[in-house]
Image (cartoon, grey):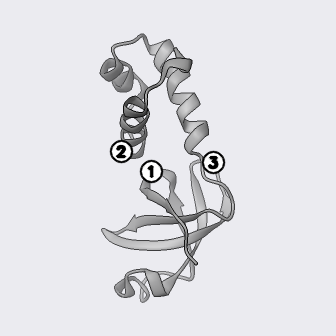
Amino acid sequence: MVRNITNETKTMIETELRKGTSNSRIANLLGVSYEQALEVVDAIKESIRPEIGDEIKFTFRKQEMVGVIRKLLTNSAVVEIYWDLSSGTMKDICEDKTIVNFKDIEEFVKVD
């Protein structure tokens, strides 16, 4: 099953994982058994897990932010914020580094 993941399915599962959807709900969406869904979800989680040094766009309190991952935790990362590319309204309430849940990462970006 894991070998036959289409790009459409991968995108859908990534979106559902970022929303916090349960594995049983993902199994239902895919129309497969729970065990098969776990295999697919685990494979996709590994493929989307960020790495130290990745530059990301994320949301925090509904504001768009950009930063670089400095440390990985289990389901989140310590991110150094690029203030020149982020919402200035957040500067008063955020430190230069913040914790970002993986589900809040919107995309990986390349900042020159």
Q: What number of labels is visible?
A: 3
Q: Position of residue 83 (x, y in %)?
A: 49, 85
Q: Quadrant of residue 59?
A: bottom left
Q: Which residue is mark 3?
A: 74
Which of the two marks, 3 or 2, is nearer to us in this view?
Answer: 2
Q: Which residue is mark 2?
A: 19
Q: Which residue is mark 1?
A: 103
Q: Which three-letter amino acid code belongs to the residue tagged 2?
A: Lys
Asked if labels 1 and 2 touch by Cβ distance under 8 angstroms, the answer is yes
Residue 22, placed above or below residue 33: below
Residue 59 as seen in the image, left or right of residue 48:
left
Of the image marks 3 and 2, the number of the one nearer the N terminus: 2
Q: CA distance from mark 3 to mark 1?
A: 12 Å
Residue 66, placed above or below residue 73: below
Task: Check disc 2 and report its element: helix, strand or loop.
Answer: helix
54 or 23, which is in the foreground?
A: 54
Q: CA distance from mark 3 to mark 2?
A: 17 Å
Q: Residue at x 53, y 34 (%)?
A: 44
Of the image marks 2 and 1, the number of the one nearer the N terminus: 2
Q: Position of residue 2 (x, y in %)?
A: 54, 19
Crowd class of label 3 (few under 14; some 14 to 19; many from 20; radius 10 Å): few
Q: CA distance from mark 2 to mark 1?
A: 6 Å
Of the image marks 3 and 1, the number of the one nearer the N terminus: 3
Q: Which three-letter amino acid code belongs to the residue tagged 1?
A: Lys
Task: Check disc 1 and report its element: helix, strand or loop.
Answer: helix
Q: Residue at x 58, y 29 (%)?
A: 43
